[in-house]
Amino acid sequence: MKELFRAIPAVDQCLEALAAADPMLAQTPRPLLRALVTDFWDARRQEIRAGHCCHAASLALKVSLPRLLEHVRSALRPRFREVLNATGVVVHTNLGRSVLAREARQAVSLAASGYSNLEMDLQSGGRGSRHTLVEDLLCRLSGAEAALAVNNNAAAVFLVLDEFCRGGEVVVSRGELVEIGGSFRIPDIMKKSGAHLCEVGTTNRTHLRDYAAAINEHTRALLRVHTSNYRIVGFHSVVPLPELAALAHEHGLPLLEDLGSGSFMDLSPFGLPGEPTVPAVLAGGADIVTFSGDKVLGGPQAGIIVGRRNAIERLKKNPLTRALRCDKLCLAALEATLRLYLDPQQARERIPTLQRITMSSEELLRRARILAGRLRKALGQSCSVTVRPDVSRVGGGAFPQYDLPTSLVCLKPLQNSTSALKNALLHTEPPLLGRLDRDCFCLDPRTLEVDQFPQVVKVLQGALLGLSGQGKNDMQRTNKIGENNKLRAQFEGLKRVINVETQCP
């Protein structure tokens, strides 16, 4: 063991070898590289102690350099990385939700590359407000008197409840006490804001008389919550928005609406079920509406609040607004996205989320056939490739029961399991995410751009090649173990013969 430890090369030698092998590493801080080299050899020492490394020659720098180089490169990769989404979930929360439009990406780049008028009034030369950067657009698109953007919809709901309902009661239907991803629950956010929940009705049916009976001197608002990621069907009823608004205003109360994944556009002409749009909810009598910027809207993460001017002005003065405000990158992307909505046709074609949700089944089949053809040519006999109809999902809590027709490209490796392929693709550059179905690894072209197809082909080639090499190594190790067991058996037999002969008189 001491001999093996002495065979480990010096750290400085390793640093010189790394710089020669990859000149880009010269830009990496030397203390960081030194720490990574030390980590690598510490792991090898553990292998020596465990008996997994028995030959000094395998520790030579010339032999170990490829593994050391891969260890260093892997450790230096950014934690925040590009991912190829072939799952078919358009607004995928785990993958960053909506992909920004080209115009929004350009706006973010401009905001990040220099100084900007984030809080400067270019007309007067004095101090301005960041809230004005998107307020006019939000009002124009929604029909609201005033608007405010904060960092996400949970923050928007929290801010509204804190300002208007702290210390009082908020009346909400039991069927709307939702929990969405990340364990965000409406009752919990109410409690944190200092508002008290007053549940009315039952899970499946709530009537106007239920709300009316609950109103008292402690009531601060009536709240409607879009159920987002679930639906109640069958024996079910809710109070129409205009009726609930009339009741609230009769008692001098605001009607608050958490629309969740709000939209400015009616998507029913494209085959999706009708969902309340932001303008329709405001026209129906809601005083304040909150919704997300990065779901069906297709913009950056943001919580958007629109409604009556006096209410929004109160929110702007709330001390929490500063803590929850958007930064310049978010506001730049949001403004660029909202501008596209001024022309609905342009928005549908140029905002990726809308374009992918409304893509025709004919176009998806065409794309699936193109991708399948390229994969058959590139992968050869290592994998069978077929195309079949299936469904995609909008995601992000929007249209939870609605399936979007699509065409899947289905891969079945001939020498490895589909789960092994799925795991291997998590470690490619970039990682490729699909879904397992019917013992196949499936790619949905709805969430891939055509110009990403070459990347998809490349990472699949690399993953299957790696699995093939791993299989060969496993077979070699199995054969080696078999040979060792055979030699050990022969040796044990020889020992028994010697023992017998030595015991003879």
Image (cartoon, rainbow, N blue to C red):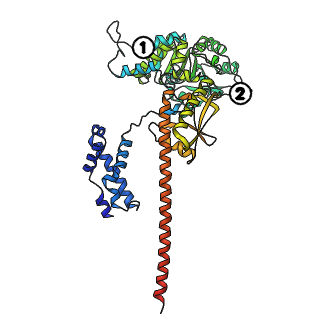
At a point 52% along the width and 22% down the height, the residue shown is: 352
299 w.r.t. 94: above or below:
above
The reply, left or right, for residue 134 in relation to residue 175 is: left
Looking at the picture, tell me which residue is in the foreground, 489 or 347.
489
Q: Quadrant of residue 213?
A: top right
Residue 155 horizontal/vertical position (percent): 49, 25
**Disc 1 element:** helix
Which amino acid type is marked by label 2? Val
At a point 32% along the width and 20% down the height, the residue shown is: 114
58 w.r.t. 31: above or below:
below
The reply, left or right, for residue 258 in relation to residue 242 is: left
At a point 50% along the width and 61% down the height, the residue shown is: 479
The label number, if any, that marks residue 233 in the structure image: 2
Quadrant for the N terminus in the image: bottom left
Rounded to the nearest angstrom, the CA distance separating label 1 from label 2 is: 41 Å
The reply, left or right, for residue 380 in relation to residue 36 is: right
Q: Quadrant of residue 250?
A: top right
Residue 77 shows in this picture: yes
Q: Which residue is mark 1?
A: 133
